[in-house]
Amino acid sequence: MEIHERIKQIRTILCNDSNEDFAKIVGEKTNTTSNWIGNRKIGLKVIIKILKHFPMVNPSWLVIEEGDMLKATTTTNNSDISTEIQKLKDELLEVHRENRELNKENNTLKKTHHATKKSPVARKKTGG
């Protein structure tokens, strides 16, 4: 497999074969990234750009088709990712709880404000 075919494989697997998504990730126009896939001669700048934006890609695989496409991950990395995901889920739940409380408080304040506007006592105090 030639390098342009490996780039296509990266796009296919990591971007669901979406050239638009691939281009956004690497910060290029779609016609530029399409040209990479049709070009048998890929420059070092392109390789570096792809590896920079897809750090999980094995550089040896991309350049000389040695090894697997994706770098091997350790269980420690997976564990760290799982821990981070759990932290984010917990934070999201807390934000949802706070949002519910703020909505309740907001509704209470609206009702109080509405009732105050309708009250004859409130109109006399405000001159209305």
Image: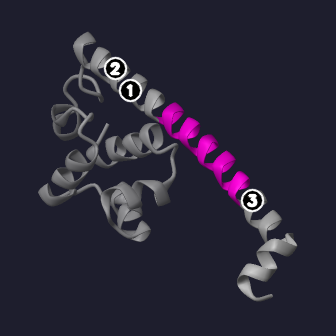
Residue at 46% x, 55% y is: 21
Q: Which mark is residue 83?
A: 2
Pointer 1 with pointer 2, Cβ within 8 A? yes
Q: Where the N terminus falls, by quadrant?
A: top left
Mark 1 → mark 2, Cα distance in angstroms = 6 Å
Q: Which mark is residue 44?
A: none
Q: From the viewer's perspective, is the residue at label 1 or at label 2 nearer?
A: 1
Q: Which residues are magenta?
A: 92-109
Q: Find out whether residue 1 is within the magenta segment.
A: no
Kind of element beneath mark 2: helix
Mark 1 → mark 3, Cα distance in angstroms = 37 Å
Pointer 1 with pointer 3, Cβ within 8 A? no
Between disc 1 and disc 3, whose residue precedes? 1
Q: Which mark is residue 87?
A: 1
Number of numbered discs visible in the structure rendering: 3
Q: From the viewer's perspective, is the residue at label 1 or at label 3 nearer?
A: 3
Most foreground residue, 42 or 94: 94
Q: Looking at the magenta stretch, what is its main secondary structure?
A: helix
The reply, left or right, for residue 50 in relation to residue 118 is left
Q: Amino acid at mark 1?
A: Lys
Most foreground residue, 23 or 4: 23
Residue at 53% x, 31% y is: 93
Kind of element beneath mark 1: helix
Q: Amino acid at mark 3?
A: Thr
Residue at 80% x, 80% y is: 123
Q: Where the C terminus falls, by quadrant?
A: bottom right
Most foreground residue, 88 or 115: 115
34 over 78 or under it: above or below = below
Residue at 72% x, 54% y is: 107
Label 2 Cα crowd, 10 Å radius (few <14 / some 14-19 / many 20+): few
Residue highlighted by disc 3: 112
